[in-house]
Image (cartoon, helix red, strand yellow):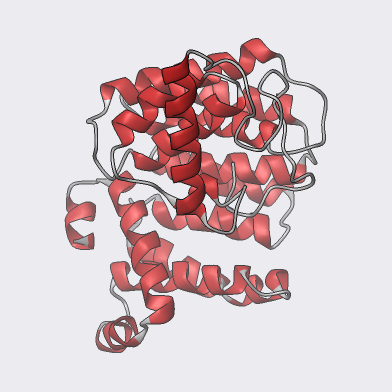
Amino acid sequence: LLVATRRRAAWEHRDRYVRRLAAFARSRPEWLDAWRDRAPRDPDALLVDAQRAVDRAWDSPARAELLREVSPLITAAARADHRDPVPWRLALDHARGARAGHTYFEELWEAAVRRAPHHHGCHVAALRYLASSWHGSHRECFDFAETAAQDAPEGSLTQALPLRAAFGYLTDGCGPAVERARLDAAADRAAALSARLPSAQPWPAELRNLLAHVLVRLGRRRDALEQFRLTGPYATSFPWDRDADDPLGRFLEVRQDVLLAVASGSESTGTDASGARSGRPGSERRGRPEPRDH
Protein backbone atom coordinates (compact mmCIF):
# COMPACT_ATOMS: atom_id res chain seq x y z
CA LEU A 1 0.00 0.00 0.00
CA LEU A 2 2.67 2.50 0.99
CA VAL A 3 4.95 1.59 -1.90
CA ALA A 4 2.06 2.37 -4.25
CA THR A 5 1.60 5.83 -2.74
CA ARG A 6 5.26 6.61 -3.40
CA ARG A 7 5.14 5.32 -6.95
CA ARG A 8 2.06 7.43 -7.74
CA ALA A 9 3.21 10.39 -5.63
CA ALA A 10 -0.15 10.10 -3.85
CA TRP A 11 1.09 12.06 -0.86
CA GLU A 12 -2.27 12.91 0.69
CA HIS A 13 -3.28 9.23 0.78
CA ARG A 14 0.18 8.28 2.03
CA ASP A 15 -0.11 10.75 4.90
CA ARG A 16 -3.46 9.32 6.01
CA TYR A 17 -2.30 5.72 5.72
CA VAL A 18 0.86 6.40 7.74
CA ARG A 19 -1.13 7.99 10.57
CA ARG A 20 -3.56 5.08 10.76
CA LEU A 21 -0.89 2.39 10.53
CA ALA A 22 1.13 4.10 13.25
CA ALA A 23 -1.93 4.31 15.49
CA PHE A 24 -2.55 0.59 14.96
CA ALA A 25 1.12 -0.19 15.68
CA ARG A 26 0.92 1.49 19.07
CA SER A 27 -1.43 -1.23 20.33
CA ARG A 28 -0.32 -4.06 18.03
CA PRO A 29 3.42 -3.42 17.43
CA GLU A 30 4.68 -6.86 16.44
CA TRP A 31 4.21 -6.51 12.68
CA LEU A 32 5.97 -3.13 12.54
CA ASP A 33 8.84 -4.24 14.77
CA ALA A 34 9.33 -7.32 12.60
CA TRP A 35 9.21 -5.18 9.44
CA ARG A 36 11.82 -2.79 10.84
CA ASP A 37 14.11 -5.69 11.79
CA ARG A 38 13.75 -7.28 8.36
CA ALA A 39 14.17 -4.05 6.35
CA PRO A 40 15.85 -1.40 8.54
CA ARG A 41 16.22 1.10 5.67
CA ASP A 42 12.78 0.65 4.12
CA PRO A 43 11.35 4.18 3.65
CA ASP A 44 7.80 3.09 4.41
CA ALA A 45 8.67 1.24 7.60
CA LEU A 46 10.89 4.13 8.73
CA LEU A 47 8.08 6.61 8.22
CA VAL A 48 5.45 4.58 10.10
CA ASP A 49 7.93 4.02 12.93
CA ALA A 50 8.75 7.73 13.10
CA GLN A 51 5.04 8.60 13.24
CA ARG A 52 4.52 6.05 16.02
CA ALA A 53 7.44 7.48 18.01
CA VAL A 54 6.16 11.05 17.71
CA ASP A 55 2.63 10.02 18.71
CA ARG A 56 3.95 8.12 21.71
CA ALA A 57 6.12 11.03 22.85
CA TRP A 58 3.30 13.52 22.34
CA ASP A 59 1.13 11.84 24.96
CA SER A 60 3.87 12.02 27.61
CA PRO A 61 4.25 14.82 30.20
CA ALA A 62 7.92 14.91 29.11
CA ARG A 63 6.86 15.61 25.52
CA ALA A 64 9.53 18.11 24.50
CA GLU A 65 12.40 16.01 25.84
CA LEU A 66 11.12 12.76 24.33
CA LEU A 67 10.48 14.39 20.97
CA ARG A 68 14.09 15.50 20.76
CA GLU A 69 15.13 11.87 21.17
CA VAL A 70 13.12 10.76 18.12
CA SER A 71 14.64 13.33 15.76
CA PRO A 72 17.01 10.75 14.20
CA LEU A 73 14.03 8.61 13.16
CA ILE A 74 12.42 11.53 11.33
CA THR A 75 15.72 12.41 9.67
CA ALA A 76 16.16 8.81 8.50
CA ALA A 77 12.62 8.75 7.06
CA ALA A 78 13.23 12.01 5.19
CA ARG A 79 16.51 10.76 3.73
CA ALA A 80 15.01 7.45 2.66
CA ASP A 81 12.97 9.11 -0.10
CA HIS A 82 13.86 12.70 -0.94
CA ARG A 83 10.61 13.26 -2.88
CA ASP A 84 8.31 12.43 0.02
CA PRO A 85 6.77 15.44 1.85
CA VAL A 86 5.22 13.33 4.63
CA PRO A 87 8.39 13.12 6.77
CA TRP A 88 8.51 16.90 6.58
CA ARG A 89 4.92 17.13 7.81
CA LEU A 90 6.04 14.96 10.68
CA ALA A 91 9.05 17.22 11.22
CA LEU A 92 6.72 20.25 11.42
CA ASP A 93 4.59 18.48 14.04
CA HIS A 94 7.78 17.57 15.87
CA ALA A 95 8.99 21.19 15.81
CA ARG A 96 5.77 22.38 17.40
CA GLY A 97 5.89 19.79 20.17
CA ALA A 98 9.59 20.38 20.81
CA ARG A 99 8.99 24.15 20.96
CA ALA A 100 11.42 24.84 18.15
CA GLY A 101 12.04 28.44 17.13
CA HIS A 102 10.69 30.22 14.07
CA THR A 103 13.95 30.05 12.13
CA TYR A 104 14.10 26.27 12.34
CA PHE A 105 10.39 26.01 11.55
CA GLU A 106 10.82 28.15 8.43
CA GLU A 107 13.65 25.89 7.22
CA LEU A 108 11.42 22.85 7.62
CA TRP A 109 8.53 24.61 5.90
CA GLU A 110 10.66 25.53 2.90
CA ALA A 111 11.86 21.94 2.57
CA ALA A 112 8.28 20.66 2.79
CA VAL A 113 6.80 22.95 0.13
CA ARG A 114 9.70 22.27 -2.25
CA ARG A 115 8.53 18.68 -2.34
CA ALA A 116 4.78 19.30 -2.52
CA PRO A 117 3.70 22.96 -2.64
CA HIS A 118 0.05 22.23 -1.78
CA HIS A 119 0.34 19.21 0.50
CA HIS A 120 -2.56 19.46 2.91
CA GLY A 121 -0.89 17.70 5.82
CA CYS A 122 2.10 20.05 5.76
CA HIS A 123 -0.19 23.08 5.65
CA VAL A 124 -2.23 21.82 8.61
CA ALA A 125 0.98 21.16 10.55
CA ALA A 126 2.20 24.68 9.78
CA LEU A 127 -1.13 26.21 10.83
CA ARG A 128 -0.96 24.33 14.13
CA TYR A 129 2.57 25.56 14.76
CA LEU A 130 1.65 29.14 13.98
CA ALA A 131 -1.46 29.04 16.17
CA SER A 132 0.59 27.64 19.05
CA SER A 133 3.53 30.03 18.75
CA TRP A 134 1.42 33.13 18.14
CA HIS A 135 -0.63 32.55 21.31
CA GLY A 136 -4.03 33.17 19.82
CA SER A 137 -3.29 35.50 16.90
CA HIS A 138 -6.14 34.08 14.89
CA ARG A 139 -6.11 36.81 12.29
CA GLU A 140 -2.57 35.86 11.32
CA CYS A 141 -3.65 32.23 11.15
CA PHE A 142 -6.46 33.25 8.81
CA ASP A 143 -4.02 35.22 6.64
CA PHE A 144 -1.81 32.16 6.26
CA ALA A 145 -4.75 29.82 5.62
CA GLU A 146 -6.48 32.07 3.10
CA THR A 147 -3.29 32.64 1.10
CA ALA A 148 -2.64 28.89 0.95
CA ALA A 149 -6.25 28.19 -0.08
CA GLN A 150 -6.17 30.77 -2.86
CA ASP A 151 -3.01 29.23 -4.31
CA ALA A 152 -4.19 25.62 -4.03
CA PRO A 153 -5.46 23.81 -7.14
CA GLU A 154 -9.11 22.91 -7.53
CA GLY A 155 -9.99 19.81 -5.55
CA SER A 156 -7.06 20.14 -3.15
CA LEU A 157 -7.93 19.73 0.52
CA THR A 158 -5.71 22.75 1.19
CA GLN A 159 -8.59 24.86 -0.13
CA ALA A 160 -10.32 24.08 3.18
CA LEU A 161 -7.43 25.34 5.32
CA PRO A 162 -9.37 28.51 6.37
CA LEU A 163 -11.96 26.15 7.87
CA ARG A 164 -9.23 24.91 10.23
CA ALA A 165 -8.48 28.50 11.16
CA ALA A 166 -12.17 29.11 11.81
CA PHE A 167 -12.38 26.03 14.01
CA GLY A 168 -9.34 27.22 15.94
CA TYR A 169 -10.98 30.57 16.56
CA LEU A 170 -14.35 29.12 17.54
CA THR A 171 -12.83 26.70 20.05
CA ASP A 172 -10.26 29.05 21.54
CA GLY A 173 -11.21 31.71 24.07
CA CYS A 174 -8.31 34.08 23.47
CA GLY A 175 -7.20 36.57 20.87
CA PRO A 176 -9.00 39.46 19.14
CA ALA A 177 -12.31 38.92 17.43
CA VAL A 178 -12.43 37.63 13.87
CA GLU A 179 -15.11 39.10 11.63
CA ARG A 180 -18.19 36.93 11.15
CA ALA A 181 -17.91 37.40 7.38
CA ARG A 182 -14.47 35.80 7.46
CA LEU A 183 -15.80 32.78 9.34
CA ASP A 184 -18.68 32.38 6.88
CA ALA A 185 -16.31 32.72 3.92
CA ALA A 186 -14.12 29.93 5.32
CA ALA A 187 -17.16 27.68 5.70
CA ASP A 188 -18.44 28.56 2.22
CA ARG A 189 -15.08 27.74 0.62
CA ALA A 190 -14.98 24.37 2.39
CA ALA A 191 -18.59 23.65 1.40
CA ALA A 192 -17.76 24.33 -2.25
CA LEU A 193 -14.88 21.86 -2.01
CA SER A 194 -17.06 19.29 -0.27
CA ALA A 195 -19.62 19.52 -3.07
CA ARG A 196 -16.92 18.58 -5.61
CA LEU A 197 -15.79 15.50 -3.67
CA PRO A 198 -17.56 12.11 -3.79
CA SER A 199 -20.29 11.62 -1.19
CA ALA A 200 -20.36 8.93 1.50
CA GLN A 201 -16.65 8.15 1.12
CA PRO A 202 -14.21 7.78 4.02
CA TRP A 203 -11.36 10.01 2.85
CA PRO A 204 -13.30 13.35 2.71
CA ALA A 205 -15.07 12.50 5.99
CA GLU A 206 -12.90 14.54 8.31
CA LEU A 207 -13.38 17.64 6.18
CA ARG A 208 -17.16 17.20 6.26
CA ASN A 209 -17.31 16.41 9.98
CA LEU A 210 -15.27 19.51 10.71
CA LEU A 211 -17.37 21.61 8.35
CA ALA A 212 -20.62 20.40 9.95
CA HIS A 213 -19.22 21.23 13.39
CA VAL A 214 -18.25 24.76 12.33
CA LEU A 215 -21.55 25.38 10.54
CA VAL A 216 -23.52 24.37 13.65
CA ARG A 217 -21.44 26.74 15.75
CA LEU A 218 -22.24 29.48 13.26
CA GLY A 219 -25.96 28.69 13.49
CA ARG A 220 -26.12 27.48 9.88
CA ARG A 221 -27.97 24.24 10.53
CA ARG A 222 -29.47 23.76 7.09
CA ASP A 223 -25.99 23.91 5.58
CA ALA A 224 -24.73 21.58 8.30
CA LEU A 225 -27.45 19.08 7.46
CA GLU A 226 -26.18 18.91 3.88
CA GLN A 227 -22.69 18.02 5.18
CA PHE A 228 -24.13 15.30 7.40
CA ARG A 229 -25.90 13.94 4.30
CA LEU A 230 -22.70 13.96 2.27
CA THR A 231 -20.75 12.38 5.12
CA GLY A 232 -23.04 9.36 5.27
CA PRO A 233 -21.93 6.84 7.91
CA TYR A 234 -18.37 8.17 8.25
CA ALA A 235 -18.25 9.89 11.62
CA THR A 236 -14.73 10.87 12.69
CA SER A 237 -13.44 11.39 16.23
CA PHE A 238 -12.16 14.86 15.35
CA PRO A 239 -13.70 17.39 15.93
CA TRP A 240 -16.42 15.86 18.12
CA ASP A 241 -13.90 14.87 20.77
CA ARG A 242 -13.50 18.59 21.51
CA ASP A 243 -16.96 18.64 23.10
CA ALA A 244 -17.37 15.20 24.64
CA ASP A 245 -15.57 12.09 25.84
CA ASP A 246 -17.79 10.06 23.48
CA PRO A 247 -17.20 11.58 20.02
CA LEU A 248 -19.50 9.17 18.20
CA GLY A 249 -22.29 9.86 20.66
CA ARG A 250 -21.72 13.59 20.23
CA PHE A 251 -21.79 13.28 16.45
CA LEU A 252 -25.10 11.42 16.57
CA GLU A 253 -26.57 13.87 19.07
CA VAL A 254 -25.65 16.94 17.04
CA ARG A 255 -26.79 15.36 13.78
CA GLN A 256 -30.18 14.53 15.33
CA ASP A 257 -30.52 18.04 16.77
CA VAL A 258 -29.74 19.55 13.36
CA LEU A 259 -32.23 17.29 11.63
CA LEU A 260 -35.01 18.18 14.09
CA ALA A 261 -34.21 21.91 13.93
CA VAL A 262 -34.36 21.99 10.13
CA ALA A 263 -37.51 19.86 10.04
CA SER A 264 -39.24 22.21 12.48
CA GLY A 265 -38.10 25.33 10.63
CA SER A 266 -36.01 26.57 13.57
CA GLU A 267 -32.61 25.92 12.04
CA SER A 268 -31.27 29.38 12.93
CA THR A 269 -32.08 29.23 16.63
CA GLY A 270 -31.07 27.16 19.60
CA THR A 271 -27.65 26.19 20.84
CA ASP A 272 -24.54 25.40 18.88
CA ALA A 273 -22.27 22.39 19.13
CA SER A 274 -20.59 23.76 22.24
CA GLY A 275 -23.78 24.73 24.02
CA ALA A 276 -23.39 28.45 23.27
CA ARG A 277 -26.13 30.46 21.59
CA SER A 278 -25.83 30.17 17.85
CA GLY A 279 -25.54 33.89 17.21
CA ARG A 280 -22.38 34.12 19.32
CA PRO A 281 -19.91 31.39 18.37
CA GLY A 282 -17.93 30.13 21.31
CA SER A 283 -16.97 27.18 23.44
CA GLU A 284 -17.53 26.00 26.96
CA ARG A 285 -13.96 24.73 26.88
CA ARG A 286 -11.78 27.81 27.17
CA GLY A 287 -8.02 27.78 26.80
CA ARG A 288 -5.63 26.18 24.34
CA PRO A 289 -6.84 23.81 21.67
CA GLU A 290 -5.65 20.23 21.88
CA PRO A 291 -2.46 19.20 20.00
CA ARG A 292 -4.30 17.71 17.02
CA ASP A 293 -6.84 20.52 16.64
CA HIS A 294 -6.83 23.26 13.92
Residue that appears at 22% across and 30% down:
198
Left/right of residue 114 with respect to residue 139 in the rendered view:
left
Left/right of residue 177 with respect to residue 71 in the rendered view:
right
Q: Position of residue 98 (x, y in %)?
A: 69, 63
Residue 162 visible in rendering: no
Q: Position of residue 126 (x, y in %)?
A: 58, 42
Q: Position of residue 165 (x, y in %)?
A: 61, 31
Left/right of residue 168 with respect to residue 15 in the rendered view:
right
Quadrant for the C terminus, please: top right
Location of residue 45 by image quarter? bottom left
Location of residue 12 by image quarter? top left
Q: Is 260 in front, or is 231?
A: 260
Residue that appears at 31% across and 58% down:
17
Residue 27 visible in rendering: yes
- Is 204 above or below relative to 290? above
Quadrant for the N terminus, please: bottom left
Q: Is 166 in front, or is 14?
A: 166
Residue that appears at 23% across and 61% down:
2
- Is 210 above or below relative to 182? below
Residue that appears at 63% across and 55% down:
291
Q: Residue furthest top?
A: 181
Q: Position of residue 286 (x, y in %)?
A: 79, 44
